[in-house]
Amino acid sequence: MKSGLFITFEGVDGSGKSTQLRRAVQYIRQRGHRVVVTREPGGTRTGERVRDILLASKTGKLAPLAELALMYAARAQVLEEVVRPALARGEVVVSDRYNTASFAYQGYGRQLGTPTVRAFDRVICGSTQPDLTIILDIDPERARGRALGDARRGSHLDRIEAASLAFHKRVRAGYLAIARRAPERIKLVCAEQSIDELQNQIRALIEPLLARRNRNSKLETRKS
């Protein structure tokens, strides 16, 4: 059984997800917790090679089912090497995307449907599900403007970022639908506010989990 804490960050490309994740990780560490940070696709040597295939523009047209299979292949590896061992050690794992991304991007965005994604998820992820998933919600047109702005400053759009606006609108619709189905675990926060305001909301979502974890640790110490 896992004894750690698993937190995932989600959102369409350009939502500011990675910035907020970094700040949240800093906060959790300041609260005295050991944190392992990972990302998807990627997080391991094998996973990063799969990431290169998935995101490289030169990959060209990739069949939606092949894309989904590659995502879960990378996920299986990071679960085996990083996530499950860290949880077993009682650490906090914070991931830049996890399985919710597959339901949104491949299930809704690529229109494979939820049942197809769930079939992969049952086998690969099983009971290793996040304790908290934070979705940074933003209008895809605004998010696209941010991504294009980054591209003009020397960055470049990857294969998925460069997908059509219609695709990204389907992804956002997927995230909203997923959040409605599991409001106790999946929290939607508006990304169209200042970085500090957004971080305060995220900390308010994380803090109860950290406080409960501290209480449980004290109880275990007393029993021992």
Image (cartoon, rainbow, N blue to C red):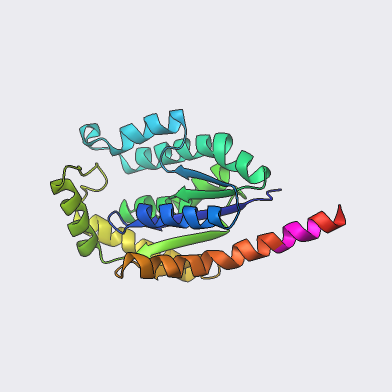
From the viewer's side, name the closer residue of 88 and 194.
194
Residue 190 picture location, percent across and down: 35, 70
| Camera sees residue 138 | yes
Q: Magenta residues: mostly which secondary structure?
A: helix
Q: Give the range drawn in magenta.
A: 215-220
| Camera sees residue 112 | no
Q: Which residue is drawn at 60% across and 63% down?
A: 209
Give the answer, above or below, for where 83 lies relative to 188: above
* Quarter location, residue 16: bottom left
From the viewer's side, name the closer residue of 44 and 66.
44
Q: Does the magenta stretch include residue 219?
A: yes
Q: Does the magenta stretch include residue 164?
A: no
Residue 144 relative to residue 176: left or right: left
Residue 87 picture location, percent across and down: 63, 46
Looking at the rendered structure, the number of numbered marks drawn on it comes to 0
Q: Which residue is drawn at 46% across and 65% down?
A: 202
Residue 68 picture location, percent across and down: 39, 42
* Quarter location, residue 49: top left
From the viewer's side, name the closer residue of 221 and 85.
221
Give the answer, above or below, for where 166 lies relative to 161: below
Q: Residue at x 50, y 51 (%)?
A: 118
Q: Which residue is drawn at 31% across and 70% down?
A: 193
In the rendered image, the residue lying farthest to the left is 152
Residue 222 picture location, percent across and down: 84, 58
In the rendered image, the residue lying farthest to the right is 223
